[in-house]
Amino acid sequence: MHRDNYSTLFDKRVCTELLPPEKTNDFFEALFGDAAEGSYDIELAYDQADESRMRFNILLHERPGHCLACNLTQGLPQVFSRHPVIDIAGIVEQVSARLGDSVRITGWQLGSTEQRSSSIHLIPLTLTIA
């Protein structure tokens, strides 16, 4: 598969299948015992690819009436990387299945939280591909 086609292969609909919206409430239910305690909604979005990497973003959207402060999101890459509800390894497996035999994923990494605005933060998910 040509790398230019990834944006079509991983459009908004597919990214929503890979990380469904209900995972946000499941995550906060597991973390706090109450989904209403969560201060953001989680969304997966395809970003870009080159010959050796593919990047998705895990977007954190501030919920109405809550504060998406940096101190709440800075430690999330470590939490998300191993939390069974978010299941980054499972997302990577699903991406691999969608790529088929044309591309092999050889590793993945969550980067540091980036603040896009006061109400949107993101965590880059970089897949190493061959």
Image (cartoon, rainbow, N blue to C red):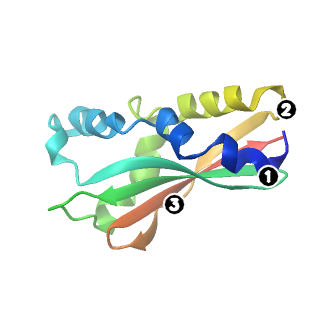
Q: Label 3 is placed on what type of residue?
A: Ser
Q: Secondary structure at mark 2?
A: helix
Residue 111, percent from left and from top = 56, 56
Residue 30, percent from left and from top = 25, 32
Tell me the crowding category of disc 1: few under 14, some 14 to 19, or many 20 or more residues within 10 angstroms, Cα based. Answer: few
Left-right relation of 108 to 124 = right
- Compare residues 91 and 79 and report the one nearer the observer: 91
Q: Quadrant of residue 67?
A: bottom left
* Residue that numbered label 3 is attached to: 112
Q: Which label is found at residue 4?
A: 1
Q: Quadrant of residue 47?
A: bottom right
Looking at the rendered image, the disc whose residue lies closer to the viewer, 2 or 1, is 1
Give the quarter of the figure containing the C terminus.
top right
Q: CA distance from mark 2 to mark 3?
A: 29 Å
Left-right relation of 36 to 117 = left
* Residue that numbered label 2 is attached to: 102
Tell me the crowding category of disc 2: few under 14, some 14 to 19, or many 20 or more residues within 10 angstroms, Cα based. Answer: few
Q: CA distance from mark 2 to mark 1?
A: 13 Å
> Nearer the N terminus, badge 1 or badge 3?
1
Q: Are marks 2 and 3 in contact (CB under 8 Å)?
A: no
> Nearer the N terminus, badge 2 or badge 3?
2
User: Among all residues in the image, which is located at the extreme bottom?
Assistant: 117
> Nearer the N terminus, badge 2 or badge 1?
1
Left-right relation of 46 to 77 = right
Which residue is depicted at the point 19% across and 60% down?
64
Give the quarter of the figure containing the N terminus.
top right
Q: Label 1 is placed on what type of residue?
A: Asp
Residue 25, percent from left and from top = 26, 37
Q: Are marks 2 and 1 in contact (CB under 8 Å)?
A: no
